[in-house]
Image: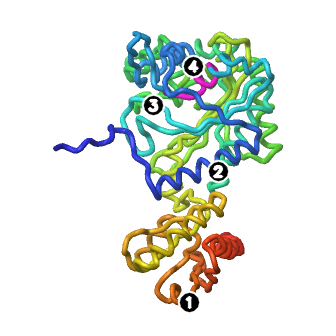
Amino acid sequence: MEKIAAPRGTADLYPPESGRWQALEARAREIAHRFGYGEIRTPMFESTDLFVRGVGETTDIVEKEMYTFADKGGRSLTLRPEWTAPVVRAVLEHHLLAQGPQRFFYVGPMFRYERPQAGRFRQAHQFGVECFGFAGPEADVEVIALAHDLLASFGLGVRASINSIGDDVCRPRYREALVAHFAPHRDELSLDSQSRLDRNPLRILDSKAPQDRPFVEGAPTMLDVLCEPCAAHFAAVRSLLDAIGIPYDVDTRIVRGLDYYTRTVFEFISTDLGAQATVCAGGRYDGLVAALGGPPTPGVGFALGMERFLMILEKRGEIAVGPRAGIAVVALGDAARARAVPLVAALRRASEGLAITIDYGDAKIASQFKKADRAHARAAIIIGDDEMRDGTLVARDLATRGQETVPALATDALAAQSVLAWYRALRPETEVAA
């Protein structure tokens, strides 16, 4: 019988890889909480109209990449291709803006039909934040700083690229300037850019087609035509980034592939996957809430591609894993395993969430230590013939390889307390590494 494989562009996660994901998610959650952001979760599928109205009919996402289907009631539904529009929908549906400005973060999958490649999947995962209700540049700088701190926390040299794409006042002037620039070269542009020239010429700046590059490089910039309020906003963003020590470059070619962005846009780029890859990108979207039926409400946020980021960490040798934690019980022989089962149960009851593992097979001690290493355990408790005879346990620190004898005591509950007291007295792994 032919084996059934995972769909192309998707991936299964299992230990130890799932541990790296958990470490990244934990770090992202911790930093988001530090900035005052709370988690929001939305359905993985939504009304198709949400993305057509929110993301834009002429975007690649809506035209080419959405997984859309009709349910049994004939309703058109779409697997979530991005997070911001669903978050706005949830904010409006539950009247959260009536409570004042809102800060959210999210972690989870999104779906786009595109050619799978390094760091790009059809089911991908993102961490991101959305901040609603602050029109000033301080909110732009806050989300850029949050992204910067998350990337820098993994030891990466981090530098933002920023730009302004104006608003409804000055963007029409820019559209006219782009049409005037690209129209004489229409026949030399890629087919996608020829189509965009009539519908959304700003999107040509985001083209990756080689034949478009010379014309994109010579195009006028949005900064040349910014209205006074947009220019002042961008200048204030730069000033505040300088004030808090966030390094950045102004890149006038940055645009966003979604129609809802206004004013500040930014991204963080890595070259660690061979070619330039956007690890994290975002910006301001002051018109999106109103476009989806809500009151005029400013917003700003970003999304980070988790698969791509983990690949970068792995390539740099900086795997996102937390410190060793937990205890592996190593039992040698049938009698030792019988003795270990109630001890493991007592440890799990008393350990307050600490991982307690045991190999119930008849593997040799070296093999069991390898499994403990793969589980990223910090310690091992060894029970063999000698320990059974002497009424003791051997406690080994898997970080330092040092070990000592621990009394088994009269009951399993007391033995568990003895083991846990020894475990909690271990030096932090950061000190061991130093």
Instruction: Name which residue type carries label 2.
Output: Arg
Tell me the distance, in whole angstroms, between the alpha carbons under discs 2 and 3: 24 Å
Against 408, residue 128 (above or below) is above
The x and y percentages for residue 78 are: 45, 21
Start and end of the magenta stretch? 81-89
> How busy is the neighbourhood of tag 1: few (under 14 within 10 Å), some, or many (20 plus)?
few
Going from N to C along the chain, the mark reached first, 4 or 3, is 3
Instruction: Name which residue type carries label 4.
Output: Asp
Q: Secondary structure at mark 2?
A: helix
Instruction: Name which residue type carries label 1.
Output: Asp
**Marks 1 and 4: which is nearer the front?**
1
Per the image, the residue denoted by label 1 is: 390
**Marks 4 and 2: which is nearer the front?**
2
Tell me the distance, in whole angstroms, between the alpha carbons under discs 1 and 4: 73 Å
Instruction: Name which residue type carries label 3.
Output: Phe
Q: Secondary structure at mark 1?
A: helix
Q: Quadrant of the N terminus?
A: top left
Residue at point 73%, 12% (across, down): 295
Asked whether the viewer can see residue 315, the reply is: yes
Per the image, the residue denoted by label 3 is: 111
Tell me the distance, in whole angstroms, between the alpha carbons under discs 1 and 2: 44 Å
Q: Magenta span has 22? A: no
Circle on res. 350: none
Give the camera-side residue of 213 and 418: 418
